[in-house]
């Protein structure tokens, strides 16, 4: 990792609670992830996504997902995991977030599908601290839709389009967000950087 590589992202996350990192991976690495995601989707290895700690299938979201399995990562997945780990360590060190690990999954939205407004932190767990979404869509145009819409504290919102190589970071407990429908298939990796969960009081 280059010295101070993630300083800008760290400062933005500290100041605003969210940020965008362009070109987290090389174009070759990003394309390898996109190719793998497409192949797995074609082979029906992704399953309809669930929501909440009880993993319920609902109409709130229309994507299919497949978790990255620790200890059984493909070469493209390992390259992504290594980069996320570098970022996790930098954020945790400079922002005192206590991030101990991360979890990631491929997500594919067919044309017309979205994900209703929600928070990423689960109701009975505070383990998720930082949410990250890495996009795999080559040559994406704004007119194709599919933006991640972040709802900000001042009641405004910010739309981030899912262009290949872009990573969006935001604090899981603070930012409601939704995925807007697109006119073409939309691929991403959803990732959550986690702290050790604090047991609920009884």
Image (cartoon, rainbow, N blue to C red):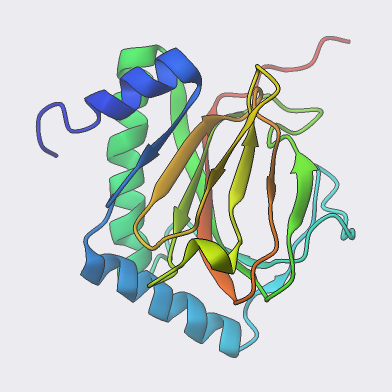
174 relative to 142 in the view: left or right: right
Q: Where does the image place residue 167, in percent across and percent down from the top left?
A: 40, 47
Residue under the point 74% across and 67% down: 113
| Among the 4 quarters of the image, the one containing residue 165 | bottom left
Q: Is residue 53 left or right of residue 66?
A: right
Residue extending farthest to the bottom is 43
Residue 74: x and y in percent read 37, 70
Query: Image quarter for residue 149?
Result: top right
Quarter the C terminus occupies: top right
Residue occupying the point 50% across, 54% down: 161
Spot occupied by residue 123 in the image (x, y as percentages of width and height): 81, 29
Q: Nearer the viewer, residue 146 or 69?
A: 146
In the foreground, 21 or 200: 21
* Residue 160 place in picture, x, y as percent: 51, 47
Residue 197, compared with residue 86, is above or below; it is: above
Front-most of 64 and 99?
64
- Up-down: is 108 above or below 170? below
Residue 161 in sight from this viewpoint: yes
Q: Is residue 155 left or right of residue 92?
A: right
Q: Is residue 43 above or below residue 51?
A: below
The answer to whether 155 is drawn above or below residue 66 in the figure is above
């Amino acid at each position: 990792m280059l010295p101070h590589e993630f300083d800008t992202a760290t400062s933005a996350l500290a100041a605003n609670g969210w940020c965008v990192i362009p070109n987290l991976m090389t174009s070759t690495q990003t394309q390898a992830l996109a190719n793998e995601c497409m192949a797995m989707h074609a082979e029906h290895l992704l399953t309809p996504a669930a929501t909440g700690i009880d993993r319920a299938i609902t109409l709130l979201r229309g994507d299919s997902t497949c978790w990255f399995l620790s200890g059984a990562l493909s070469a493209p997945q390992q390259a992504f995991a290594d980069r996320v780990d570098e970022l996790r360590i930098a954020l945790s060190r400079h922002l005192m977030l206590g991030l101990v690990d991360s979890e990631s999954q491929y997500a594919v939205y067919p044309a017309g599908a979205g994900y209703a407004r929600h928070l990423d932190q689960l109701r009975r767990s505070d383990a998720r601290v930082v949410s990250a979404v890495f996009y795999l869509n080559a040559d994406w145009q704004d007119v194709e839709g599919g933006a991640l819409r972040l709802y900000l504290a001042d009641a405004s919102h910010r739309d981030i389009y899912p262009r290949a190589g872009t990573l969006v970071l935001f604090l899981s407990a603070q930012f409601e967000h939704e995925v807007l429908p697109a006119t073409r298939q939309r691929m991403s990796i959803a990732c959550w950087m986690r702290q050790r969960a604090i047991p609920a009081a009884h």
